Image (tube, rainbow, N blue to C red):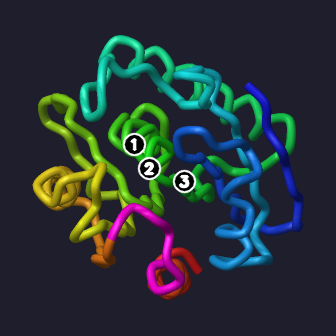
Amino acid sequence: MEHIYQNNNSDYTFILLHGTGGSERDLIPVAQHLNPDFNYIGIQGDVMENGMRRYFKRHAEGQYDIEDLHMRGQNLADYIVELSEEYDFDIAKTILVGFSNGANIAIHLLLNQAFNFEYGVLLHPMYPVPLEDNLDLSNTKVFASMGKMDPIVPVSDSEHVKSIFEEHGASFEEIWVRSHQIEMVELKAAQEWLNKTVL
């Protein structure tokens, strides 16, 4: 995997996970808006789909390759742990920031309690995947933005993401916007959530 790292000598580090077709640099402006003082690491997905980078394979839109998702999720978690050792940052003080496909792999990391990720900013996520039994997300804190007229993620799938976290004890805050683009209003709401939740 390719990555870019910015050390701002903060206790907190953003893990930036781009959408389909993106790169490790795509969400740097998002990180700078959320908190310019936090460190950040942008990680590029290592799956190619029609020439576009992703974090895991799929059979079609909204139809995940579950086996590949589990493998790639483990690989990504291991990679972040390696980076934490290389750059000396605390996994417990990382915030997963993902857009679209990046938000989906971020959900996968948040749901696996062995990975120890507690904070997530999920921009336009979906997660049509069976869940583990006895899932306890009481230490998990999530902000999500979702589109009322999203051409990629139906409202029902957005509501499902909300239910995943709320029904398993996570702290969950949401904002509804129009479509599948990152809007300033959701970044402002995410910034406010971050300030009251993490700091």
Q: Which of the labelled discs sits on residue 104, or is there none?
A: 1
Q: Which residues are magenta?
A: 179-186
The amino acid type, in three-letter code, at marker 2 is Ser
Between 136 and 142, the residue placed more toward the observer is 142
Q: Residue at x 62, y 47 (%)?
A: 91
- Asked if the magenta segment contains residue 182, the reply would be yes
- Asked if the magenta segment contains residue 66, the reply would be no
Q: Report, in whole angstroms, how far the alpha carbon at label 3 lies from the one at label 1.
A: 11 Å
> Which residue is identified by label 3?
96
The reply to whether discs 3 and 1 touch (Cβ–Cβ < 8 Å) is no
Instruction: Answer with left or right where residue 22 lies relative to residue 195.
Output: right
Instruction: Answer with left or right where residue 85 lies relative to residue 112.
Output: right
Question: Is residue 120 placed above or below 173 in the rendered structure?
Answer: above
The reply to whether discs 3 and 2 touch (Cβ–Cβ < 8 Å) is no
Q: Residue at x 53, y 39 (%)?
A: 20
> Which residue is identified by label 2?
100
Residue 171 in the image, given as x and y percentages of width and height? 29, 68
Residue 8 in the image, given as x and y percentages of width and height? 88, 67
Question: Is residue 71 placed above or below 170 in the rendered structure?
Answer: above
